[in-house]
Structure formats: C-alpha cells, structure tokens
Image (cartoon, grey):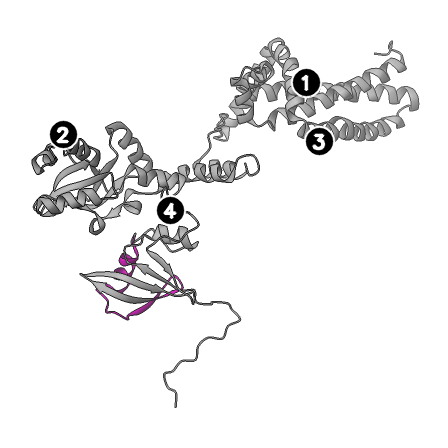
Amino acid sequence: MNAIPTGALFFILVLLVLISGFFSGSETALMSLNRYRLRHQANNGNKAALRTAKLLEQPERLISLILLGNNFVNILASAIATVIALRLMGEPGIAVATGLLTLVILVFAEVTPKTFATRRAEKVAFIASAVYGPLLIITSPLVYAINWISTRILKLFNVSAESDERLSSDELRTVVNETAGMVPARHRDMLLNILDLGSILVNDIMVPRNDIIGIDLENPWEDILQQITNSPHSRLLVYRENIDEVVGFVYLRKMLDGMRMGNLTQSYLESVVRDAYFIPEGTSLTVQLLNFQREKRRVGLVVDEYGDIQGLLTIEDILEEIVGEFDIDPHITPPEIRPQDNGAFIVDGTAQIRNLNKALSWDLPSDGPKTLNGIVLEHFENFPQKGAEFTFNNHPMTILEVEDNRVTQVLIDLPINTDEDDEPPVAAIGDA
C-alpha cells in the first residue's frame, strides 16, 4: 500500500464509502419490501421481481452476504484512512482520521443511503438483486460457513433460525384495514366479514325454532295451497303435526311444475319433498359454508347434541354476513327494532343480539344468549311478569309483553349516564 500514491488512496477511500452505502441501503430496501406486492409482481412475470423474490427465499444467506461485504469494505476503508492520516499528519492524524471516517460513514454510508432506500425500496431492491445474485454464487462457500456458525450459536440459546411469514387472522385484519384509500370501503368490509366467519356459529344467525315457517301435512289441502301461493320464501319446511316430525324441504318451483301439469295435489307435494339436511349446533359459518357447497344444499336444520331442532339456516343467511342484507336497506332499522320518539326502542324478543349490535352500534355481549328473549330469561332465571324492569349492559329494559312462555316485546331505554362527574343517587333506606 506504501507504493500507492496518496491521491489514488483518496479515490479508493471514496469508492469504498460509496460501496458501503450501497450495501447499507440495499439491505434496508430488501428487508422493507412489501412481500405481497413483490409476489404479485413476480406472478405477473416481472423479471426483476422474480430475481428479488428468489433472493429473499433465503434471507439469512442474503443478510450474511451483505454484512460480509459491508464489514469488509468498512474495515478496508479504515485501514486506508489510517495510511492517509499517517502520511499527512503522522501518528496524531490517526485520531483525526478515525473521527472523520466515523462521521463520513455515518452520513454517507448509513443514514443517507438507508433513508433513500426506505423511500425507493422497490427500485433499490431490484437493482441490488442484479448484483447480489452473481455475488452470492461467488461467495457461497464463505456465506455457507458463516451461516453454519451462526445457526449453531443460535441453537445454544434455543432460537430457531427459521422465520414464519404467515399472518394470523388478526394480523390479516390489520392489513385489510390499512388498505383504506386503495380498496373501496364496501369491499374492505366484505373482506373483514369473511375473516369473522370463523368466529361466528350457526347458532348466532339461525332462524329460531319458534320462528320457522313450514307446511304441516296434517292441515287441510286448501290451507296448504294458500300457504304455498302466498309464501315469500323459495323453500319451505315440510312436517307432520310438529317440527320434530320433519319430512323434508320443498322447493316452490316444483309446485309451479305441478301447477303447469295440472297435478298440484298433496301426493305430488309429498313426492317432490327433498330429505332434510341437519347441521350440528356450534358449527362455524366458515365450515358450514363449505358443507353447503359440498353437499349441494342451500338450507338446513340446526340440531343440538340430542338431535332436537333448534333453528333453520340457509346459505343466504351466511352470505348476508359477508355482503349485508339482500332485501333490507342497511340504513333502515330492521322491523324487529322500532325506534321511539324519546330515543328508546321497542324490540321483539326474537331479535338476535348480533343484529341489535349491528343495527344500533351497541356492544351487548353475544357470547351467551343469542336473542333478547334469552337475555331476559337468563337474568330473571324465570319467566318475568309484564312490566318487570332490569338493566343489562347499562341499558334499562322493561318487559312489555310475555306470551306462550316467551318474552315477545321489550322496551330498551337510552344507556344510563355513567360519567364520573354525576352524583350518585341518594339511598332511600333510612330517610326520615
């Protein structure tokens, strides 16, 4: 090195600082790339993206190569700076060179390149991948040795060198939420609803047993015919005397075929009934949607562990959890919830807690009873009398109607004000 002119050493030093900056900046760019965007570009045939994605398949090798090159360049730059300092200022120049080189590397080889790389990550990463591909082949024996030593050290501390890039449902939900401005709000809500399907059970959205509409074959044929004619549904449950004696389901379009043929009789009705399909309670909507698809079914009966029918579920019910109600304006309150002039609501006992929360932006707990009637019965542990009052989740509730061992209407008042500044009510006990 003594034979190299000082001017040439200065040039080499500047070149080494630039190379160090390339290593530092490219590391930041490669590690901060949006991996999902990169995979999308690679799948679309982008050669630079393909090259970069292949490098990132083994990030430990890439990091070893970058650190190897960066440290080698920095150490060589330090040696050259020392030689230059000795030539120009003698031994006192070593301290000056150390301080100046530290500042130069910090500014020009670390902070500036890394800041630039974070703002132009994709471009820097694509350029760097063209350099690191061949370089990784040349230095592979040395990189392998470094990784082998590093892996053995990590095992001493019971740390795995493998990384897991899989996202949990909560993390994926965060990713979807961060797409605001890029994905329409309606589509984003649908994606979030799909993620929620796994945590919602068929019990949460089924039509309760008492609300199931069906055809009783024991009724007079005229009544059955009128029911078929006026039904708003495309499928009806068919049973004898009570729902527990299920025959199956009938598709009303089959009735149209019988009408065209002039053969619309009860025997024809029974001949086109399709066997009932049963769904175990506690099944998640994700699983049940797949079951509907596999079994080529659109409607089923939810049963408990004893085989008793608890409710009815259709594939449309599941799809509405994703895209919203098909036949109701989302801005209109559901018919089972009737707003009052004073801000209170009269709610049917059959109203589901999840629907109340969605329609009124409440946060009533839905991990227990699924309907308002269930909440009332759980609270009183008996059938309450008309006019009974209680408070649930800060909402005062008054029983308005009770029929056939069911609470049919409840008045839900505005939430109680629980601000700390409010004075507590004065107890009446002991008053003069």
Question: Which of the two marks, 3 or 1, is nearer to us in this view?
Answer: 3
**CA separation in Å, label 2 and label 3:** 78 Å
Q: Which mark is residue 115?
A: 3
Inspect the image, locate mark 3, and give the three-letter code of the amino acid beneath it.
Answer: Thr
**CA separation in Å, label 2 and label 4:** 36 Å
Secondary structure beneath dot 2 equals loop
Question: Which of the two marks, 2 or 3, is nearer to us in this view?
Answer: 2
Q: Which residue is mark 4?
A: 328
The span picked out in magenta is 371-397
Question: Which of the two marks, 2 or 4, is nearer to us in this view?
Answer: 2
Q: Quadrant of residue 288?
A: top left
| Image spot of residue 413 (x, y percent) | 39, 66
Q: Are marks 3 and 1 in contact (CB under 8 Å)?
A: no
Decide which of tag 2 and tag 4 comes sooner along the chain. 2
Question: Which of the two marks, 3 or 4, is nearer to us in this view?
Answer: 4
Question: Which of the two marks, 2 or 1, is nearer to us in this view?
Answer: 2
Q: Nearer the viewer, residue 74 or 340?
A: 340
Decide which of tag 2 and tag 1 comes sooner along the chain. 1
**CA separation in Å, label 2 and label 1:** 85 Å
Question: Which of the two marks, 4 or 1, is nearer to us in this view?
Answer: 4
Q: Which residue is mark 1?
A: 69
Inspect the image, locate mark 1, and give the three-letter code of the amino acid beneath it.
Answer: Gly
**CA separation in Å, label 4 and label 1:** 64 Å
**CA separation in Å, label 3 and label 1:** 20 Å
Decide which of tag 3 and tag 1 comes sooner along the chain. 1
| Image spot of residue 210 (x, y percent) | 20, 52
Q: Residues within 10 Å of mark 2 (few under 14, many from 20)?
A: few
Q: Which residue is mark 2?
A: 261
